[in-house]
Amino acid sequence: MSAPLREIAGPAGRLEALLDDPDGRELRAAVVLAHPHPLLGGTMHTKVVFQAAKALSRIGCVVLRFNFRGVGLSAGTFGGGSGEMDDFRAALDFLRERYPATRLWAGGFSFGSWVALSVGATDSRVSTLLAVAPPLASYDFSAVAECPKPKFFIQGERDDICPLKRMREFYAQSVEPRELVVIDGADHMFDGQVSQVADAIEDLLEDWNE
């Protein structure tokens, strides 16, 4: 069940958000999930983000989706990446205050994966990282590669933003533990294959407890 939140207190003003609850299941983790690039149409309602949230909810996670500054009803304007990282930290603060005894995971799709993993790699509160279609050719993921936290990656075979070859190189250089799922024939937005992203998330994380 999704419940709209009136606001999260963000550094540039209110952040519009939705909280997906695990429908009575035992709570395993609290997850902040970030959306694609704000200037390219990304929102918390993007199909992959929506389906990822539902998948995480089905395996017992409470999931916070939110709009970065300047998107939807969120205050402010695009922050060039650093502002969005501050927004993500505010979302983590919200979940930590609301669920103080629950492990925190950081995840995102495309641009949102760069924001989420960059913050999550260095935030001691975050235990697990999840990236869907990380734009490795466009942003610096070196801190993520060097991070010893568990990292889960979902990649489209025909992603033109992050070619599979680049992902395999990055994955090989990344510190363990890590896992990668490649979805056959999928492009960057997983057009027509969004449900497979949800399936991959459930397969990867259903029994994960860190």
Image (cartoon, grey):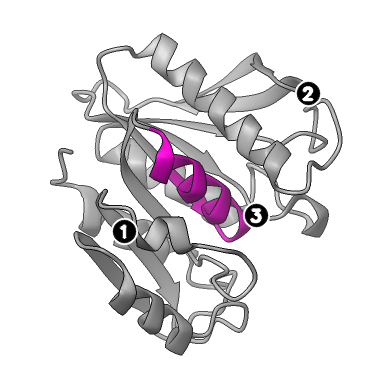
Mark 2, secondary structure of its residue? loop
First-in-chain label (3 vs 2): 2
Would residue 8 be seen by someone viewing this image from the given angle? Answer: yes
Would you say 110 lies left or right of 54 here?
A: right
Q: Is residue 165 left or right of residue 162?
A: left
Foreground of the two, 123 or 69: 123
**What residue do we see at 78% from left, 48% from top?**
80
Please check the rendered image and state whether residue 80 is part of the magenta-colored stretch, yes or no.
no
Of marks 3 and 2, the one in the foreground: 2
Residue at 22%, 25% (x, y): give it: 25
Picture disc at residue 36: 3
Is residue 111 covered in magenta?
yes
Percent of width and height locating residue 71: 79, 38
Numbered disc 1: secondary structure? strand
- CA gap, disc 3 and disc 2: 19 Å
Mark positioned earlier in the residue sequence (3 or 1): 3
Q: Quadrant of residue 53?
A: top left
Q: Position of residue 21 (x, y in %)?
A: 39, 25
Amino acid at pointer 1: Phe
What residue lies at 32% left-to-right and 28% top-to-bottom? 22
Q: Which residues are magenta?
A: 107-123
Can you identify the residue that label 2 sits on? 12
Residue wearing tag 1: 152
* Contact, mark 3 vs mark 1 (Cβ under 8 Å): no
Q: Is residue 119 left or right of residue 35?
A: left
Task: Residue 86: give x, y in percent of width and height.
Answer: 64, 32
Please report whichever mark, 1 or 2, sits nearer to the chain's N-terminal start: 2
